[in-house]
Amino acid sequence: MTRCLIALVLGCVAAAGAARADPPNDKPAAALYARSLAGDREAVIACIAALEQLLTSAPDNELARVYLGSAYTLRSRDLALGKAKLDALRKGLALMDAAATAATGNANVQLTRAVTNEALPAFLGRRNVARQQLDELVGQVEKDPEKLSPADRQILYLNAGKAAQRAGDKARAAELWQRGLTISADANLTAEIKTALDAL
C-alpha cells in the first residue's frame, strides 16, 4: 500500500504542477510525502509545513489539501496514544473530506482520499467510504480513461480490488484486477496486481 501511495503522490503532484502551474514547491512536498509514507517522522512534519505553505499561496489547490489531510493521518500514526494523536487524525480526515467535496470532478483528489482511507485501520470505519469512492472512480474512468494517468488507473484497479476482497467479494476483486492487468504503465504495479490475483 505504501508503494502505491508513493507512486500516486509523485504522479499526481507532478501532473498538477504541469496542468495548473502550481507553485514550484510541489515537487519537494511530493518528495517529503513519499518519505513520510516510508516511515520518516521528520519528513511528515516537514511535509505538513510545506503543504500548509502551499495552501497559503494557493488556497484553492484541493490536490494539496487532500495530501495535507493524508499527511496529518501519517502524523497521527507517529504520535503516542492520546489527544494529539486523535486530533491529528480528525484534522486529516476533515481536510481530505473537504478537498473531496470541493473537487468532486478531480479524479486525482478522489483517488488520493480513497487510497488513504483504504490504508487506515479498519476500526476507523473509513474502508466503506473508500470502497464506495473507488467503485465510483472505476465507473468514471471506464467512461473517460483520461481522468487518470495509466499508472494511476493501475493504482485504482489494484486498490478497488483490495477493497472488494476485504468486503468478501472475491469475484469483483478478480474482475477489477484483471482489468488492471490490461494497462501496461508500471511494471511494479503490474506485478503487484498479478500477485494479488494469483493469491485470490
Image (tube, grey):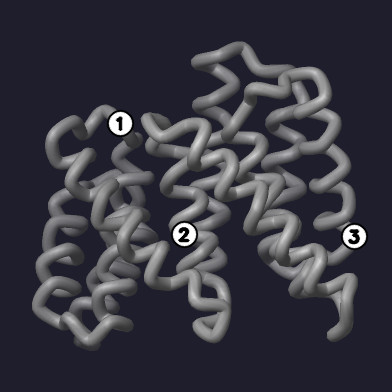
Amino acid at the residue labelled 1? Lys
Nearest the eye: 157 or 198 = 157
Q: Is label 3 in a helix, a strand or a loop?
A: helix
Tell me the residue at 20%/77% (across/down): 197
Q: Is label 2 in a helix, a strand or a loop?
A: helix
Amino acid at the residue labelled 2? Val
Give the percent coordinates (x, y) of residue 83.
88, 76
Nearest the eye: 14 or 84 = 84
Q: How many marks?
A: 3
Q: Earlier in the sequence, mark 2 or mark 3?
A: 3
Residue 11 lies, with reference to residue 200, above or below; the image says above
Amino acid at the residue labelled 3? Glu
Instruction: Identify the residue position indicated by label 2 in the image.
Output: 115
Residue 152 lies, with reference to residue 145, above or below; the image says below
Are the residues at dot 2 and dot 1 in contact (C-beta closer than 8 Å)?
Answer: no
Viewer can see residue 127: yes
Tell me the residue at 81%/66% (across/down): 87
- Disc 2 versus disc 1: distance between alpha carbons? 16 Å
Give the percent coordinates (x, y) of residue 77.
75, 74
Tell me the residue at 50%/49% (across/down): 112
Q: The C terminus is located in which quarter?
A: bottom left
The circle on residue 42 is 3
Give the percent coordinates (x, y) of residue 67.
64, 45
Instruction: Identify the residue position indicated by label 1 in the image.
Output: 147
Q: Is label 1 in a helix, a strand or a loop?
A: helix
Viewer can see residue 34: no
Residue 197 lies, with reference to residue 151, above or below; the image says below
Q: Earlier in the sequence, mark 3 or mark 1?
A: 3
Q: Earlier in the sequence, mark 2 or mark 1?
A: 2
- Binning the other alpha carbons within 10 Å of mark 3 as few (below 14), some (14 to 19) or many (20 upward) gives few
